[in-house]
Image (cartoon, rainbow, N blue to C red):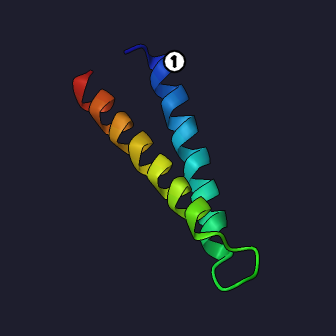
Amino acid sequence: MTEEHQDDVARRYVEASRIAAAEARKTGTPEYDPRAHQRAVEHERRLAETLAQRTSQG
């Protein structure tokens, strides 16, 4: 994996973390959508796994 690609995955992970946190802060409000929150958390988890795998490979 190139360093540039790894940086891209890291940037996407940080953005996914930000989105998941924003969804979590809506808990208890009328704007909270548990499905949207779950999707954001799952996306963050997948990116974390990808980043961990690629970091350990190279």
Mark 1 lies on residue: 4
Numbered marks: total:
1
Residue 6 sits in which quadrant?
A: top left
The structure residue drawn at horizontal position 44% and vertical position 40%, both measured from the top left corner, is 47
The structure residue drawn at horizontal position 63% and vertical position 80%, both measured from the top left corner, is 27
Residue extending furthest toward the top: 2
Amino acid bearing label 1: Glu
* Front in this rendered view, residue 20 or 29: 29
Screen quadrant of the N terminus:
top left
Q: Residue 11: x percent and y percent? A: 57, 36
- Crowding at dot 1, Cα within 10 Å, few <14 / some 14-19 / many 20+, comes out as few
Please determine whether, in this image, residue 33 is positioned above or below residue 29. above
* Front in this rendered view, residue 19 or 37: 37
Residue extending furthest toward the left: 57
Dot 1 falls on a residue whose secondary structure is: helix
Residue 54 sits in which quadrant?
A: top left
Screen quadrant of the C terminus:
top left
Q: Residue 38: x percent and y percent? A: 51, 61
The structure residue drawn at horizontal position 28% and vertical position 33%, both measured from the top left corner, is 53
Residue 31 sits in which quadrant?
A: bottom right
